[in-house]
Image: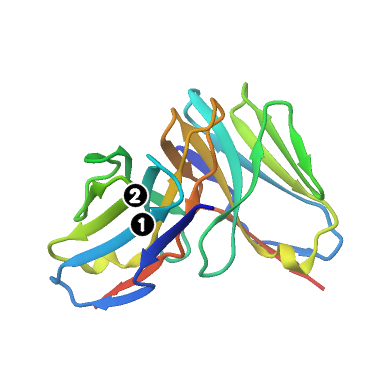
Amino acid sequence: SQTIHQWPATLVQPVGSPLSLECTVEGTSNPNLYWYRQAAGRGLQLLFYSVGIGQISSEVPQNLSASRPQDRQFILSSKKLLLSDSGFYLCAWSVLFDRRGAEAFFGQGTRLTVV
Amino acid sequence: RKEVEQDPGPFNVPEGATVAFNCTYSNSASQSFFWYRQDCRKEPKLLMSVYSSGNEDGRFTAQLNRASQYISLLIRDSKLSDSATYLCVVRVGGFKTIFGAGTRLFVKA
């Protein structure tokens, strides 16, 4: 069966520090991978999605970047965190089964607080 | 205009009540539609896909109106355990998945 791992679960970082969040998927090949951010009391904002190794699409201009060095590994990074980067970060994967698409499965999320 | 819009609620209903949520989307090329459920401080999980002909899963019924570009979710006989945030989700093309901000539901005894 497929599983998705995301770590760390919680993180407190000072302003200006770097960030690296990692997500890995097991049990599937060539998944579509996503990074979302959810600010307190708000919906999920799509940050990046990737349809293959080295292929990253950015949805919003921001202080973050993403990389996909391996088929089932997706990394979210920042060189210098801002206070506004605080939020709940979720990695997700999906596989396109048919024209209807397929559900996205989420990792357990990383709660980032920038202080 | 947001790509996916939902009434944020909260909806406060007694146990046993029927409650309906609506969601509108702006991209007429949207291909796939889903309802997700998110419990407090947890990751979202798929509740049900939404098909053009409408579909039902137990107490939950989902409807899609492509002409008006809206999706609905009906919950019958609400349970305390239904309390959560319900997210409307639209997929454009094969990959880009957009979530609504969610509708909060509180079911009270």
Percent position (x, y) of residue A28? 44, 45
Residue B14 to residue A115: above or below: above
Residue that appears at 37% across and 68% down: A110
Q: Name the kind of residue labelled 1 in the image.
A: Thr
Q: Is residue B93 above or below residue A75?
A: above
Q: Are marks 2 and 1 on the same chain?
A: yes
Circle 2 residues within 10 Å: few <14, some 14–19, many ≥20: many
x, y percent for residue B50: 65, 36
Q: Specify the label residue A24 is tagged with.
A: 1
Disc 2: which chain?
A
Element on which disc 2 rests: loop
Of all chains, the one bearing label 1 is A
The amino acid beneath tag 2 is Arg
Res A72 label? 2
Say whether marks 2 and 1 touch (CB < 8 Å). yes
- Where is B107 relative to B30, above or below? below
Return the x and y of residue B56 as percentages of the image width and height: 78, 40
